Image (cartoon, rainbow, N blue to C red):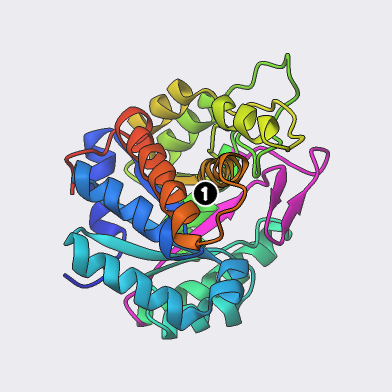
């Protein structure tokens, strides 16, 4: 089975009341952990690559890893560019075999966002590739995306219909309370998704797939493990997973997950070296890290996304 676009995935997800996991990948162990979990649970899958990951691992290496995952699992897998910030980057990924790209012009004025998104859509659609766009800005840090809490803004439901019609985008990322990165909310706060905004967007765009970025939940057991083995990470929390599951039952068809994977991998490696300080074979510490990612993804697929058995 070749790489697929997200079109059919999202149609099924919208009708079925579940979401597809979009997991960021950077190396072989991360790809293996994610895809082994999806294969075990027979779940459709989006593997996504940021600009930074592409620079780190090299486009060709990442393509071959993802192609290997398709061969090994037989699952429907889409390869997606996460947070493309220019037409040139999106074009390079389209030309290089990606089946989906995101153009993130959300920090630009409304008309500039439309113009750049439309440019990417025209090129992508001519090459059989789908496009995700964004309205509203999430606080937090992810690679080159760095937005302060003061500069973040919720998506305005009154803008979404015009934006989608004028750009022709295939899915839309909106800002309803999630946040990029691991340091999400201060202890003692009560983070909540603005499901009222999502509901209003759904009314204005019936049947249209919505995307949530910054949807990792920062599992406290991994924060505790990192701190136990030499780290100094605040006990931050994320949006409660039950709220993400509610969003998946509505119009949200794609939920991005990255920080959870990084935490699971880092915590596992820190623990391994604390217990085996004299070991130096990468297979010895990356193997358990891969296992930790696999278990994390299985949990997300079953308990948050609800897409197990939907491949």
Q: Position of residue 304 (x, y in %)?
A: 38, 30
- How many numbered badges does the structure rendering display? 1
218 drawn magenta: no
Asked whether, in this view, residue 13 is left or right of residue 140, the answer is left
Q: What segment carries the magenta color?
A: 127-156
Identified at 28% across, 59% down, the residue is 7
Identified at 32% across, 38% down, the residue is 298
Q: Position of residue 189 (x, y in %)?
A: 71, 17
Q: With respect to residue 17, does 160 lie above or below? A: below
Secondary structure of the residue carrying numbered label 1: strand
Taking the view exactly as shown, the residue that stands out farthest to the right is: 150
Query: Which secondary structure dominates the residues rendered in magenta?
Result: loop
Asked whether, in this view, residue 112 is left or right of residue 103, the answer is right
Camera-side residue: 168 or 172?
Answer: 172
Identified at 30% across, 35% down, the residue is 18
Camera-side residue: 134 or 310?
Answer: 310
Q: Is residue 286 visible?
A: yes
Q: Is residue 177 visible?
A: no
Q: With respect to residue 243, does 292 lie above or below? A: below
Other residues around mark 1 within 10 Å, as few (<14) / some (14–19) / many (≥20): many
Q: With respect to residue 274, does 234 lie above or below? A: above
Q: With respect to residue 215, does 280 lie above or below? A: below
Identified at 33% across, 29% down, the residue is 249
Image quadrant where one finds the N terminus: bottom left
Q: Position of residue 20 (x, y in %)?
A: 34, 45
Camera-side residue: 273 or 108?
Answer: 273
152 drawn magenta: yes
Q: Position of residue 139 (x, y in %)?
A: 72, 42
Q: Quadrant of residue 144?
A: bottom right
Asked whether, in this view, residue 148 is left or right of residue 194, the answer is right
Mark 1 — residue? 173
């Amino acid at each position: 089975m070749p790489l697929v676009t997200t079109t059919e995935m999202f149609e099924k997800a919208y009708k079925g009341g579940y979401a597809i996991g979009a997991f960021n990948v950077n190396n072989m162990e991360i790809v293996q952990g994610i895809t082994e979990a999806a294969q075990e649970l027979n779940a459709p899958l989006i593997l996504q690559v940021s600009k930074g990951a592409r620079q780190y691992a090299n486009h060709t290496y990442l393509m071959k890893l993802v192609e290997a995952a398709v061969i090994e699992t037989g699952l429907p897998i889409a390869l997606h560019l996460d947070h493309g910030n220019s037409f040139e980057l999106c074009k390079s990924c389209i030309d290089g075999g990606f089946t989906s790209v995101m153009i993130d012009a959300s920090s630009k004025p409304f008309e500039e966002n439309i113009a750049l998104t439309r440019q990417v859509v025209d090129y992508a659609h001519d090459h059989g590739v789908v496009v995700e766009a964004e309205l509203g800005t999430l606080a937090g840090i992810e690679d080159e995306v760095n937005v302060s809490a003061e500069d973040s803004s919720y998506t305005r439901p009154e803008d979404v219909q015009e934006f989608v019609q004028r750009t022709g985008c295939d899915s839309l990322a909106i800002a309803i309370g999630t946040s990029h990165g691991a340091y999400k909310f201060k202890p003692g706060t009560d983070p909540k998704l603005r499901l009222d905004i999502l509901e209003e967007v759904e009314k204005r765009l019936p049947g249209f797939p919505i995307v949530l970025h910054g949807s990792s939940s920062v599992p406290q057991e991994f924060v505790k493990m990192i701190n136990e083995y030499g780290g100094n990470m605040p006990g931050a929390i994320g949006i409660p997973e039950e709220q993400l599951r509610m969003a998946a039952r509505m119009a949200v068809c794609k939920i991005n997950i990255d920080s959870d994977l990084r935490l699971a991998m880092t915590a596992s490696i820190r623990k391994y070296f604390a217990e085996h300080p004299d070991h130096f074979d990468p297979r010895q510490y990356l193997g358990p890290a891969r296992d930790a990612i696999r278990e994390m993804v299985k949990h997300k697929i079953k308990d948050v996304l609800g897409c197990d058995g939907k491949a």
